[in-house]
Amino acid sequence: MKSFSTTFLPSPLFEPGHPTHGKARLSAFPLPCLHSSSQNILTFPSVIVARIVLNYKSIPYITSWTEYPDIAPTLSALGIQPNPSSTAPWPYTAPAIRLTSGEHVMGSLAIATRLEELYPNPPLHLDSSYLVRVNEIIAKVSEILMLVHLTGTQGLLRSRSADYFAADREKMLGMPIEQYSYKKIGRHVFEEVAPHVQEMAKMLRDNESGPWFLGENVGYADLVVVSWMRYWSEIGVLKDVVRSGSEVETLRALYAAAAPLLERDAY
Ligand SMILES: N[C@@H](CCC(=O)N[C@@H](CS)C(=O)NCC(=O)O)C(=O)O
């Protein structure tokens, strides 16, 4: 178990007067992620994907790191409007960014959409039908793996965040994570996710010209899958989730192709 973790909030601040210039200087604010004993590590997939979008578009930015219990106070102090209760269990969530204009954006898809407007190239293909299908599959996988995700994330956090996380998720589950975990023992979750992972790999093979869903063109759908793979790797279950037959090769090729986008993850 890693002894350290924290949420982080990177917020890009675009240099005034050059809002669409690819080399605009960014300064930082909130998004969540975790720490290892030696460095910050991106944790939750929505945080990872926001970071990958910044890297993919070569947008300079600064990251600031925040522990879980500080996410809401930090973001509300910035004047960010809370999430509608219908869309998230928490009023304030990482990732969030701040632009040099002073505008704040919270939520990974909202961030991607705004950055796509400001920095259209290279494009994210946010209107691709693959994105809809990927989100559907991820929702199913995520539900099946909820316990794995809860315990995996918990294991990465340092004590202040871990205490918050345990108390908050206990409220959500109606019981402590450990008790929930005990109830679920015996469920073969990795076997249950296999058909969904296979479906995703099959979709990736639709376009044989490249490792991405759109063949040679990277899209946000790819970045979403890669962020989940990175998260599964971080919590030590990537080999359990992506484990059989041809899906291993297909998804490994996607992950390998995305490696340069994952390089900057700790500052
Ligand atoms: N739909 C949001 C979800 C983000 C999200 O769930 N973030 C979690 C990270 S674990 C969070 O900040 N939770 C706040 C909390 O636990 O208080 C997005 O894609 O950005």
Image: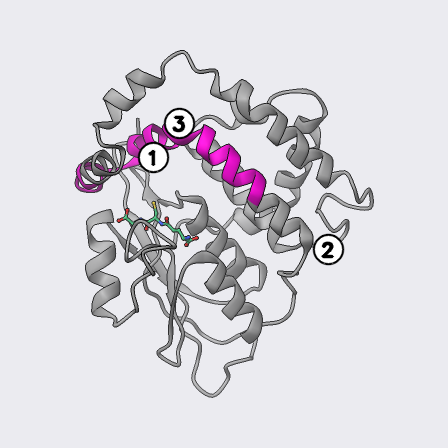
At label 3, counting other C-alpha atoms closer than 10 Å, the crowd grade (few under 14, some 14-19, many 20 or more) is some
Magenta part of the protein: which range? 136-164
How many numbered markers are drawn? Answer: 3
The residue depicted at 21 percent of the width and 27 percent of the height is 176
Secondary structure mainly formed by the magenta segment: helix
Residue 57, given in percent of the width and then of the height, sits at 58, 64
Label 1's element? Answer: helix
Residue found farthest to the bottom: 17
Between circles 1 and 3, the one closer to the viewer is 3
Task: Please give the residue where the numbered disc 3 appears in the rendered image.
Answer: 148
Image quadrant in which you'd find residue 10? bottom left
Q: CA distance from mark 1 to mark 3?
A: 8 Å
* Left or right: where 238 falls relative to 160: right
Residue found farthest to the right: 209
Residue 206, given in percent of the width and then of the height, sits at 78, 41
Task: Please give the residue where the numbered disc 1 appears in the rendered image.
Answer: 153
Q: Quadrant of the N terminus?
A: top left
Q: CA distance from mark 2 to mark 3?
A: 32 Å
N-terminal-most mark, 2 or 3: 3
Label 3's element? Answer: helix
Magenta stretch: residue 199 in it?
no
Are circles 1 and 2 on residues that touch, CB within 8 Å?
no
Image quadrant in which you'd find residue 180? top left
Residue kind at label 2, given as amino acid type: Asn
- The residue nearer to you, when weighing 4 against 186, is 186
Residue 39 seen by the camera: no
Disc sitting over residue 217 in the figure = 2
N-terminal-most mark, 1 or 2: 1
Report whether the residue tagged 1 is closer than 8 Å to ligand 1. yes
Q: CA distance from mark 1 to mark 2?
A: 32 Å
Residue 144 seen by the camera: yes
Residue kind at label 1, given as amino acid type: Thr
